[in-house]
Image (cartoon, grey):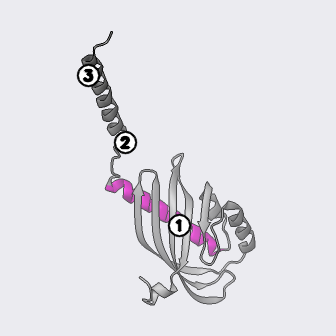
Amino acid sequence: MQRPCSFLVTGIALLGTVLTTGCAVSSVQPDSKADIDQAREAIWAKELAIYAARGKGDLETYLANTSLHYMGWPPGWDKPSGQDQLRAGAAQMKGQAGEELTMDLTGFTLSGDTGVIYYGTHRTRLPGGAATDQRFHVIHVWTREQGEWKLIGALGRDGSMAQQGAAK
């Protein structure tokens, strides 16, 4: 028969082991400045390539950089959509060269295999070449899948009002 004191000591030792192991496993090391810089540069290069291809009427670069789990919410859409809708948009846009825009990186954060990039765009020509003056704010969420950055989430909003100082 086990003595109550022995049972208590065993229980305390087991609890201590679980807590120590749990803390060691759950402690997250912050990303180094070098990791953050490298991720930001890699992801920003992908963003620039996506928009350069869009200017030529090609959304295939966008599609090639999306995760199978991608979900995006473009400005003016009622709800987010996945790759199927993106493919449909790619088919509609194919060959509509002429979109012109500038991009301004405004923020980036990294947590392990997840990078979130924030930027603004100023579009002066629509696909097809018609002149316009549109500004958008974009947030893209990237995840590292098998060592490669893939776009998993996207949200765009009209940035015109904010650019005029009406919203902050």
Write down the residue under mark 3.
9
Side of 5 relative to 96 (left or right):
left
| Disc 2: CA contacts within 10 A as few (<14), some (14-19) or many (>=20) | few
Write down the residue under mark 1.
47
Picture quarter containing residue 13?
top left
**Mark 1 element type:** helix
Determine whether 78 is above or below 5 in the image: below
**Mark 2 element type:** helix
Residue kind at label 2, given as amino acid type? Ser
Q: Position of residue 51 (x, y in %)?
A: 57, 71
Marks 1 and 2, Cα distance to the nearest angstrom? Answer: 32 Å
Residue shown at 37%/53% (left/top)? 35
Marks 1 and 3, Cα distance to the nearest angstrom? Answer: 58 Å
Disc ID at residue 26: 2
Disc ID at residue 32: none
Determine whether 61 is above or below 78 in the image: above
| Disc 1: CA contacts within 10 A as few (<14), some (14-19) or many (>=20) | some
**Dot placed on the residue nearer the N-terminal end, 1 or 3:** 3
Marks 2 and 3, Cα distance to the nearest angstrom? Answer: 26 Å
Q: Position of residue 87 (x, y in %)?
A: 71, 64
In magenta, the rendered stretch is: 33-56
